[in-house]
Image: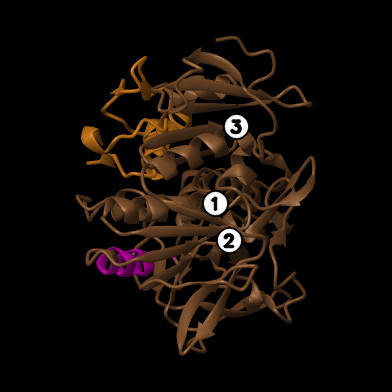
Amino acid sequence: MRIELDRPRCEGHGLCEEAAPDLMHLDDYSDLVIDVPEVEGEALERARAAVRACPVAALRLV
Amino acid sequence: MATPPRNIVVVGNGIAGLTAADTLRAGGFDGDLTIVGAEGRPAYSRPALSKALLRSDADLASHELPPPDHGATELLGRAAAALDPGRRVLMLDDGSELGYDGLVIASGSRARRLGTLPDELVLRTLDDAMRLRERITSRPDLVVVGGGPLGMEVASGALQAGCRVTLVTNEPPMERQLGTHLGETITETALARGLTLIVTPAARVVDRGGRSVAELADGRLIEADLLLTAVGDIPNTEWLAGSGLPSGGALPVDSRGRLRPDIVAAGDVAAVPTAAGHARSPIWHSAIEQARVAAAALLRGDASSELHARPYFWTEQFDLDLRVAGRTPLVGEPEVIDGDVGAPEGPALLRWRHDDGTATAVALNYRIPIPRLRRLCEASAVV
């Protein structure tokens, strides 16, 4: 599956990075960078946790 | 636990219940999973209700969460009514019974009210938020009772919507959470934006001719078109009466979220062990942390990880954006890591050091990746 970011929604709380630091990170300007958009297997579970942790629902798995 | 559970029931469809269900599936649980949610709607983001959703230009979907993919049977619009932990049976308010061999209690909390009349508004659920949003469009005069983050966010949103807002509080706004330094900064900013503030030792809400009215300690009444109270929340545990588990207060869990090997609790309903005894941490991020730990404990018992709480919360009020990593309350003056001390509204990066070697870092109108903000909380942290 693919991680999609709704950038205008992102407020930079970083709870997604905490759940899946190997898949995404906030850059120096607090903008989220999806490092690994296509995920499967165990990475998919971490991506799900990242999507779930976002309080502004800025991430989706499609 | 001798045998892993095959039939787990989650009471509560908020972020704690949802995270518990997700974590169970991610941890390999492929048995029967049932979620009971008292509100007859999908889970939503509670932090959004008093922030984005109150803005006049709000995206009315800002509280919506991605749909669940845990594959649980969802029983929405039904509440837990009683529990028999000996028989491992949960009774619902429609009279039906659910057996389980693992139970997650995430029944949340509800707004504490100061009065008895239905016109006293609170902000806890999505329905509450939509009602408030609709009511403030006609720009009524509003009295908010409560000077914590929720009361201040509502006051800020209503002011921005064009209401005249009076905030009544028994201590200076935000000081119990963030100390005098930030409390004073926030208060000055709120006053400059037009908030009327009344600090009174013991505000009450009284019935005057069938209407809820705020009454100050000196007996003065503060009349307005609308009254909203934001004075804390009460854990939903009355349904556990007679179960042998604690009821009528928070559920004190162990370091893995357990009340018993087969029953865990997480979120606003749970009190977790801290250095100062069991305490609730009714914020979004704590609910997620606790639910992950509790779900893992249900599956793997003592082999699972203990809770290492890393509190984080944020508030948006009066054009101030505050992000707080580390524990509260904050006492004394901060160390200014970056920013201009002469500009009270920031941007500033502040830190309070605690006696135990940890610290709390606050970003005030300051853009910083939150993982970096968190690192400032760790002992001997350097920028």
> Which badge, 3 or 2, comes first in the chain's sequence?
3
Q: SS of the residue at dot 2?
A: loop
Q: Amino acid at mark 3?
A: His
- Residue at numbered disc 1: B148
Q: Residue at x 35, y 73 (%)?
A: B225
Chain B visual colour = brown
Q: Are marks 1 and 2 in contact (CB under 8 Å)?
A: yes
Q: Which residue is mark 3?
A: B181
Quadrant of the drawing holding the N terminus of chain B: bottom right
Pointers 3 and 2 within a single chain:
yes
Of badges 3 and 2, the one in the foreground is: 3
Magenta stretch, residue numbers: B123-135
Q: Main secondary structure of the magenta part?
A: helix
Q: Is residue B130 magenta?
A: yes
The reply to whether label 3 and label 1 mark residues of one chain is yes
Where is residue A17 shown, x and y percent of the image? 42, 28
Return the x and y of residue B186 as percentages of the image width and height.
Answer: 49, 39
Separation of marks 1 and 2 at Cα, in angstroms: 9 Å
Query: Which residue is painted at 36% across and 40% down in the image?
Result: A51
Q: Nearer the viewer, residue A59 or B27?
A: A59
Residue A8 picture location, percent across and down: 22, 35
Residue B343 vertical position relative to residue B296 in the rendered view, above or below = above
Q: Quadrant of residue B114?
A: bottom right
Label 1 marks a residue whose chain is: B
SS state under label 3: helix
Chain whose colour in the figure is orange: A
Q: Residue at x 38, y 65 (%)?
A: B142
